[in-house]
Image (cartoon, helix red, strand yellow):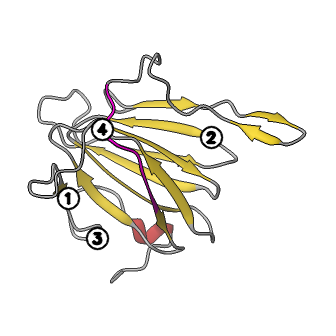
């Protein structure tokens, strides 16, 4: 487990109409502050990686089809520097992943369906000065190969 990363199982409450699932509450120990909420999708074979933040903490959850979420600790002073962590999250494994600043992360479908990932970062996106560092998903020093999980290069 990467230092500072929290993987929180979620508890859907089903009834005869469907289900309800709280993802993150302001009284949850994981909650720091609210920046914004957005969603992104990825089609089968598409990887969205690698990026990290200087200030922002992300709170990610995959809704529906399973997503492979991968993290790599790039923080110089971290006791888990260089550690890579894989999480499968989706409707069959409802999970919230808290990703602190300095952790490179990315995701892709873990199966043959498009995924829907919701993120609740602690900061607003600054269009003029984005808090984002990026690495090529396939050409980097992170010890993880997205191709081994079905990722297609060039997308």
Quick one: label 3, few (<14), some, or many (20+) residues within 10 Å? some
Q: Earlier in the sequence, mark 2 or mark 3?
A: 2
Instruction: Tell me what residue is drawn at x 63 percent, y 71 percent.
Output: 112
- Alpha carbon distance from label 2 to label 3: 28 Å
Task: Kindly identify which residue carries mark 4.
Answer: 35
Residue 83 is marked as: none
- Alpha carbon distance from label 3 to label 4: 30 Å
Task: Kindly identify which residue carries mark 3.
Answer: 138
Quick one: label 4, few (<14), some, or many (20+) residues within 10 Å? some
Instruction: Tell me what residue is drawn at x 76 percent, y 39 percent.
Output: 19
Residue 141 is marked as: 1
Quick one: label 1, few (<14), some, or many (20+) residues within 10 Å? few
Q: Where 20 sits versus 3, above or below?
A: below
Q: Earlier in the sequence, mark 3 or mark 4?
A: 4
Camera-nearest residue between 140 and 106 = 106
Q: Give the quarter of the image for residue 124.
A: top left
- Alpha carbon distance from label 4 to label 2: 22 Å
Residue 94 is marked as: 2
Q: Where 147 sits versus 61, above or below?
A: below
- Please state the extent of the stretch shown in magenta in the rendering: 33-40
Q: Give the quarter of the image for residue 46.
A: bottom left
Q: Earlier in the sequence, mark 1 or mark 4?
A: 4
Q: Residue 89 location, x and y as percent? A: 57, 47
């Amino acid at each position: 487990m990467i230092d500072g990363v929290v993987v929180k199982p979620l508890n859907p409450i089903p009834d005869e109409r469907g289900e309800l699932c709280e993802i993150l509450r302001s009284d949850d120990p994981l909650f720091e502050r609210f920046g914004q909420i957005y969603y992104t999708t990825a089609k089968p074979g598409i990887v969205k990686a690698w990026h990290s933040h200087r200030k922002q903490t992300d709170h990610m959850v995959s809704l529906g089809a399973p997503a492979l979420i991968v993290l790599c600790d790039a923080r110089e002073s971290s006791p888990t520097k260089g550690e890579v962590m894989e999480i499968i999250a989706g409707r069959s494994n409802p999970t919230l992943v808290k990703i602190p600043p300095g952790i490179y992360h990315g995701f892709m479908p873990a199966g043959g369906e498009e995924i829907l990932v919701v993120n609740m970062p602690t900061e607003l996106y600054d269009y003029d000065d984005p808090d984002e560092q990026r690495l090529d998903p396939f050409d980097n020093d992170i010890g993880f190969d997205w191709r081994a999980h079905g990722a297609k290069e060039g997308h």
